[in-house]
Image (cartoon, helix red, strand yellow):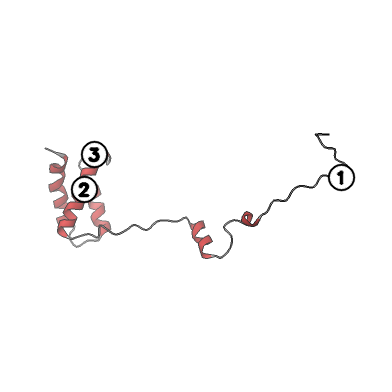
């Protein structure tokens, strides 16, 4: 029996049992029902593909919804304010003047 053949009826039962629930609740139920041990590698990829296929067939998910990129809170604050990203952005280095009475190392 293939990974897909094993996953198909389990996913169908979970989707039937969670009909009408939120995407978050469906996701949790599918996560708990994963039958192959660790969620990684080929079995997990097959599991996710089968979930997508069955949810598309049922029309029960907004699967193409783009995920919102997360920004750090500091970056969000900086984007809201109209000021340089760093106080050092306006810093212009100036050559150092020699100290009075100092001798050059190269003389």
In the figure, residue 38 lies in which quadrant? top left
Q: Where 10 falls versus 87 (above or below)?
A: above
Which one is earlier in the sequence, the residue at label 2 or at label 1?
Answer: 2
Please give the residue where the numbered disc 2 appears in the rendered image.
49
Which one is earlier in the sequence, the residue at label 1 or at label 3?
Answer: 3
Q: Quadrant of the N terminus?
A: top left
Residue, x 12% and y 43% (percent of image)?
Answer: 5
Which one is earlier in the sequence, the residue at label 3 or at label 2?
Answer: 3
Please give the residue where the numbered disc 3 appears in the rendered image.
42
| Front of the two marks 1 and 3 | 1
Instruction: Please provide percent x and percent y for residue 34.
Output: 22, 45
Q: CA distance from mark 1 to mark 3?
A: 73 Å
Please tell me how crowded label 3 is: few (under 14), some (14-19), or many (20+) other residues with Cα within 10 Å.
few
**Can residue 37 be seen by looking at this rendering?**
no
| Front of the two marks 2 and 1 | 1
Q: CA distance from mark 3 to mark 2?
A: 11 Å
Q: For numbered disc 1, what is the local secondary structure?
A: loop
**Can residue 71 be seen by looking at this rendering?**
yes
Q: Which mark is residue 39?
A: none
Q: For numbered disc 2, what is the local secondary structure?
A: helix
Q: Which mark is residue 100?
A: 1
In the figure, residue 60 lies in which quadrant? bottom left
Tag 1–tag 3 contact (CB < 8 Å): no
């Amino acid at each position: 029996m293939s990974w897909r053949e094993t996953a198909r009826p389990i996913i169908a039962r979970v989707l039937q049992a969670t009909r009408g629930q939120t995407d978050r609740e469906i996701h949790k139920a599918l996560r708990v029902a994963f039958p192959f041990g660790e969620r990684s590698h080929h079995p997990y990829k097959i599991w996710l593909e089968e979930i997508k296929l069955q949810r598309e067939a049922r029309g029960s998910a907004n699967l193409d919804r783009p995920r919102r990129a997360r920004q750090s809170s500091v970056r969000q604050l900086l984007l809201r304010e109209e000021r340089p990203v760093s106080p050092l952005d306006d810093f212009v280095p100036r050559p150092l003047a020699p100290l009075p009475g100092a001798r050059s190392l190269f003389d």
